[in-house]
Image: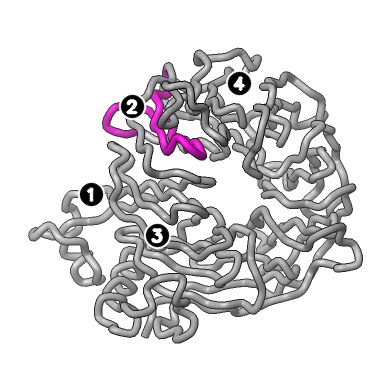
């Protein structure tokens, strides 16, 4: 990530009165678009409306194959598309039995794409032409991105099931299922997170709609934690007032914090937690950050000058060669009800909080030192991860539910109208 871009954008934000007055999504920045940092350089309608059943919307997130300049994206018309990244020309399309509303995984070592569908299956196809290699029926919608490790593919489905599949044959190795909670549930569910930390290899973490977070062995699916019931931390639960929503729908974020290796997850009503990766006990808990659907750990290494200030120019960076490196980290929490939050990953303390438009927001993604996310009604916004201020925004002319996919300074996202857009983030003049 480029420190210079972030510094330039932040400087422009501070210096420009117009930006200050338009720094909330309710007064969309694209009405003035003074920064010029975010632009659309290509767009193409993909979704066939004649294939849509029910309401038309596009969720999930594209996958990018940078080496071959390809983008893979699912659609509500039951298809997975492969496109050329430079002009969005369609290379091939694979038909499933339901809408493809998830995040594909491009696996370069196999030249294959793994993806799920609302038809309950996980698919593996050839990246070059979309030829089917295998189909695994999981008996529940598969929307979260799978993980490939060694000879195994791990995925979760909407039926509160974690599944390990042989990556060559597509046969089941093991699975873990938890009975979904009774009552009202929030749409969405957690994906898997695989640990590569020393001493924690061979562990996979996920969470469930009954309010629990769990750790399992990748070898046989055996439980590595006692049952961690996050829903019981909801205010009032200890007095016999159960929460209305138990869901823990965020894919865990794994990180080393001051207390050691941690697993960070969010309960819809109980807030955001950091749990000890070894045994699952609580390291910190912020009960105020509610309604969170996605977490992102934003990180940036900064070279310091003799004065200790971040370097923003090539001349200063050269002069600071060999100086200490300072790591700057912010845990970004995305909530459609309480806003966008910046938290200290070591303590869980609030660094900043920003209002977001009504109607929902996507997962936040990191791009060139900034944070990019889409909003259902007001377009796409570029935020500063340092203080949450709005850097730029743009209205594509249609609602967006999809999370952008990023490579370098480019991003890809599809509107609910089925139009795939290629975006570019660049410093303002």
Q: Which mark is residue 283?
A: 2
Q: Residues within 10 Å of mark 3 (few under 14, many from 20)?
A: some
State left or right for residue 7 relative to residue 41. left
Instruction: Kindly check if marks 1 and 4 are in contact, taking CB atoms under 8 A apart as contact.
Output: no
Q: Residues within 10 Å of mark 2 (few under 14, many from 20)?
A: many
| Residue 321 placement (x, y as % from top left) | 20, 58
Q: From mark 1 to mark 4, how far is it between C-alphas?
A: 34 Å
Q: From mark 3 to mark 1, how far is it between C-alphas?
A: 14 Å
Q: Earlier in the sequence, mark 4 or mark 3?
A: 3
| Residue 89 placement (x, y as % from top left) | 77, 72
Instruction: Kindly check if marks 2 and 3 are in contact, taking CB atoms under 8 A apart as contact.
Output: no
* Closer to the camera in the image, 69 or 250: 250
Q: Which quarter of the rendering shows the N terminus?
A: bottom left
Instruction: Kindly check if marks 3 and 1 are in contact, taking CB atoms under 8 A apart as contact.
Output: no
Q: Main secondary structure of the magenta part?
A: strand
- Residue identifier under label 4: 218
| Residue 38 placement (x, y as % from top left) | 49, 76
Secondary structure type for disc 1: strand
- Residue identifier under label 1: 326
218 vs 334: above or below: above
């Amino acid at each position: 990530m480029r420190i210079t871009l972030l510094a330039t954008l932040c400087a422009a934000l501070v210096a420009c009165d117009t930006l200050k007055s338009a720094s909330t999504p309710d007064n969309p920045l694209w009405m003035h678009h003074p920064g010029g940092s975010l632009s659309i350089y290509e767009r193409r309608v993909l979704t066939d409306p004649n294939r849509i059943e029910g309401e038309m919307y596009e969720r999930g997130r594209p996958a990018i194959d940078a080496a071959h300049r390809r983008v893979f994206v699912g659609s509500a018309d039951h298809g997975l598309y492969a496109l050329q990244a430079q002009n969005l020309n369609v290379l091939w399309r694979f038909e499933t039995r339901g809408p493809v509303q998830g995040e594909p995984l491009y696996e370069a070592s196999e030249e294959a794409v793994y993806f799920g569908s609302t038809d309950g299956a996980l698919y593996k196809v050839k990246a070059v032409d979309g030829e089917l290699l295998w189909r695994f029926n999981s008996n529940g919608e598969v929307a979260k991105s799978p993980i490939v490790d060694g000879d195994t593919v791990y995925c979760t489905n909407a039926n509160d099931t974690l599944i390990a599949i042989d990556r060559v044959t597509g046969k089941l190795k093991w699975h873990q299922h938890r009975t979904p909670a009774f009552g009202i549930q929030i749409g969405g569910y957690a994906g898997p997170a695989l640990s590569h930390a020393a001493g924690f290899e061979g562990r996979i973490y996920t969470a469930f709609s009954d309010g629990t977070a769990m750790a399992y062995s990748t070898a046989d699916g055996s439980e590595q934690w006692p049952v961690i019931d996050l829903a019981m931390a909801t205010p009032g639960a200890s007095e016999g007032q159960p929460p209305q929503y138990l869901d823990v729908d965020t894919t865990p974020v794994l990180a080393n914090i001051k207390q050691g290796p941690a697993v960070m997850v969010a309960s819809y009503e109980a807030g955001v937690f950091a749990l000890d990766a070894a045994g699952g006990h609580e390291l910190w808990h912020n009960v105020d950050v509610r309604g969170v659907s996605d977490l992102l750990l934003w990180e940036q290494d900064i070279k310091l000058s003799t004065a200790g200030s971040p370097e923003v120019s090539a001349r200063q960076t050269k002069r600071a060669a060999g100086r200490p490196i300072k790591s700057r980290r912010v845990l970004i929490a995305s909530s459609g009800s309480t806003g966008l939050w910046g938290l200290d990953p070591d303590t869980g303390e609030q660094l900043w909080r920003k209002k977001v438009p009504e109607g929902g927001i996507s997962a936040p993604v990191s791009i060139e030192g900034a944070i990019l996310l889409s909003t259902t009604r007001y377009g796409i916004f570029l935020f500063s991860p340092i203080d949450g201020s709005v850097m730029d925004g743009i209205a594509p002319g249609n609602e967006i539910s999809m999370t952008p996919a990023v490579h370098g300074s480019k991003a890809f996202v599809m509107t609910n109208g089925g139009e795939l857009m290629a975006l570019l983030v660049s410093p303002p003049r």
